[in-house]
Structure formats: C-alpha cells, structure tokens
Amino acid sequence: MTDLTRMTATDLAGLVASGETSAVEVTRAHLDRIAAVDDRVHAFLHVDTEGALAAARAVDERRAAGEQLGPLAGVPVAVKDVLTTKGVPTTVGSKILEGWRPPYDATIVQRLRAAGTVMLGKTNMDEFAMGSSTEYSAYGPTHNPWDTDRIPGGSGGGSAAALAAYEAPLAIGSDTGGSIRQPGAVTGTVGAKPTYGGTSRYGLVAFSSSLDTPGPCARTVLDAALLHQVIGGHDPRDSTSIPQPVPDVVAAAKLGATGDLTGVRLGIVREFTGEGAEPGVMAAFRESVDTLAKLGAEIVEVSCPHFRYALPAYYLIAPSECSSNLARFDGVRFGLRVGDDGNRSLEEVMSLTREAGFGAEVKRRIMVGTYALSSGYYDAYYGQAQKVRTLITRDFTSAFEQVDALISPTTPFVAFPIGARTADPYQMYLADLFTIPTNLYGGPGISVPCGLSEGLPVGLQVMAPTMADDRMYRVAAALESVVGTFTPPAL
Ligand code: GLN
C-alpha cells in the first residue's frame, strides 16, 4: 500500500476528493507517523488527536453528502504555536503562556478550517519567534530529521521538521526576519514569506508588528502555493492587511513547473558576496544560478548598497517593537502568575512573573528594545534604524526597476549542530543575513531546496516586489522542476 505520509498535499486532496481514500485514513496515517517518530524529532508541542479526527470525519461526511470539496480538503496541516487556536493550547514556545487555551481562532486558522484542512497540532518554535534554531523554545529543542544532532532552523523549526519527517504534508509558519525561509532551507523544504499584509496577523501572537508575516510551508512549491491561496487575502480584523486579492500563486507555480523562464530577469545582489557564507552553500547557489540561466532566465547583477545595514537595523526595530508588544504579559491577563500570595504588590507579582516566565533571549530583546526607545537614545537607535529601513526599501525599488526578482542563498550555512551557536547571540543572528532585507522592505520571499552541501540541504531564496508573490513561485517552481525534491535519510 502506498504510504500516505510520503504524498504531496495536492495528491492527498485528489485522493480524498475522488473517494479513493478518506480524510480519516489520511489523518490517521499522519498521527501514526507522529507517534512513531516525534520522540526523536520533537516537532510538536501539542498533538490534537481528537480535534484532527473530528475535522477529518466532517470532511468525509461532506463528501458523502455530495458536497464539492476545496483544493486542500482532508489534508493535514501543522500550525506553528504562534497562532491562536480556540480551546487548543497556544504557548508561543514560552513558559509565560503555559496552559493558556485561547478563546478564539486566528484568521488563518479559521480559513484553514473553512477549507477543510485538518489541524494535527501545534509546532515547536523559539520562544516568541526569537531565534534561528528552535533551541530557545522553553519546551526543549526540535531536531532536524536530516541529522537529529542538528538544528532544524528557527524560529519555525517545528513546522519545517514536521514536513521533513513526513509528520505533516503542510504547515504554517511566521516570518519576522527569516523564520519561515531559513528553517525551510536547512530542512530541505519549501517556505514562503508572503508580502507583508498579504496574510492576516489577527490571532498571531505579536513579536514585531511591522515585520510579522504568517505564511505557508510545504514539501513542494505547488503545495505551498495552494496553502498560500487558502490562508491569504484581505482581513478587516488586521489593520495592516492589504485590501487586495492574493496574486494567483497557484497558476504561477504551475507555469514555473513547465521549466521555462524565457523573458524573466533575475538579479544577483552584488553586496551578497558570499563573505560569511559556507563555501558549500555558495557552490550550490552558483550551480542553481546556472540552472536558472539554462531555463531561459537572464541573470543580471544589481547593487543594493544598504543591505549590509539590514541586520543591525533589524536588531533595533524588532526588539523595540517586541519590548512594547510583550508588555501585555504581566501575570494578570494570560497564563503564568508567580508570587501572588496576598502579601506582594502588583508590581512585584508582575516582575516575578516576567522573571520566571521569559527566557534569556526574550529578556535580552526586551532590554535592547527598551533602551533603543528610551528618551535620549531614540533618535540615535530606533530613529536611525527606521532611516536605514527606508534606504533598504529604496534599494529594492531600484533593483526591481532592473529585474523581475532577486535571488540569493536563503541562509549562509547548513544546519549546524545543536549547541553550536547558543553562546554568542550574534552568531545566531547571522543566520538571517540574506532574509532580513525582505522583511524590512515588506516584499515576499521564498526558499526552495536547491542542492546539498556535506549531505545537508541548501535553500535558494527568491525575492519579489510587494504583491508580486506570484513571481517568486514561478521561479521557485522552475528550479524545483530541475532539481526535484529532497528526502532525508530514514529516521
Ligand atoms: N531569527 C530572527 C530573530 O531571531 C528572525 C525570527 C523570525 O523571523 N521570527 O529575530
């Protein structure tokens, strides 16, 4: 019998729609796989067995009643623990929200349910999505299915690992500086950060509100596009949501799969010299550039002189916004409360709760952000960083006058061993060297597997203009049509 966990979401939806298999069978196969391997991977923080089977049964009943099912009906999906799920634990990888069951679903979760997808559970992540390895989860690290001694990327390492371990065919991530794309790259899976405002932030626990972008993760470009189409589009409950329909990313992925990029101009960023990147990563990238050229793309070098300031600007803007957003975790409204013995002041209880509930990286960000926003320092730090953000946006605007999309490696290094970069925060921050400019600009970016280095996956990033998400899917699908998908060694 074919192993349902090895199939694409597209194929699974086809089998369910035709009645060759049921949504319950598909769901059980994935729940069994989770039971068999997740003690070694730890992709999930919570598996919602009952909820998943109930959702699957509902799809099967709708089909039996003759209803026309949507393109992903009956397909399981794993959801990063940063999105609220009604009645289902949502921790954001933090002790401060341990045991919290939100009273409402995030818009994306609502749309997933309405589309008939089956939520398997919530995936592990760096606490509050701050990190690049999932080692900063308060619930222990996730392991990369390619080598369980290595990190699966972060912050959305749980979602990416669930895909690579065949525990789920689809997953949801969120990308503030690279947290969808970098885990995709190091696990050999596909991760897309939509245009900022193209996917709803309603019910996404906020880290840095001007950057946070939820998006799709999958094992193929077409599957990611189908998921993007289901979750994307205007949401009146998110004030920065763009009131326009999602570009036709599914058609673009299908067009790209024909392997023809004639007439497409792709830019390589001159300032991404490869300095600081592993030679094996750069070699895989260069080989992919040759492949894209053979498919008909014209390759052009463009200059983005301010990209070198993206990392420092991000590490002022993101912590500043986080220091403000995380003020709501005060021991009064959600989750954990420490020291409330009737003798302590409110302020003492808040301090004790935050002291016990937040991990070291989150505290570091809150302190940096509070400092950068404080009077007397605001102009020198936060104000300067905002100016840099404008200059980076101008770099993108001028680049997109010359080319249709930009390409780069997704991340400078392959999956590193667990523990290798936790001693020095800056070493961890470097993981997002190539992904952060896109977040500051607000455009879309995708990571697609492009090769191996030392037996570990390497990702290629495609960056497109805002609301031209379709372009990146076309390029990514074209590359995938040549290099194929990547299967890790058996767990
Ligand atoms: N690694 C980056 C950080 O730690 C990006 C995280 C993200 O995209 N959520 O902030």
Image (spheres, grey):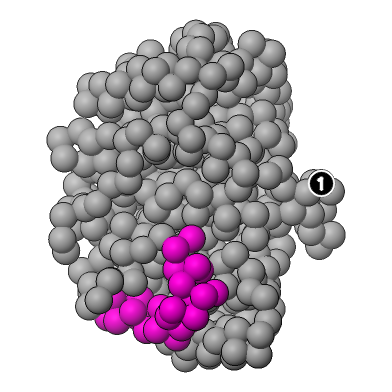
The picture quadrant where one finds residue 431 is: top left
Does 391 sit above or below residue 423? above
At which x and y percent is residue 318? 59, 42
Which is nearer the eye, 321 or 244?
A: 244
At which x and y percent is residue 128? 51, 58
Which is nearer the eye, 8 or 334?
A: 8
Does 262 sit above or below residue 327? above
At which x and y percent is residue 462? 50, 31
Image position of 144 (left or right of 358): left
User: Would residue 20 be counted in the magenta stretch?
Assistant: yes
Residue displayed at 39% across by 74% down: 45
- Inspect this view and state whether residue 315 appears: no
Range of magenta residues? 10-35
Residue displayed at 65% across by 64% down: 108
**Amino acid tagged 1:** Gln
Quarter of the image where the C terminus is located:
bottom left
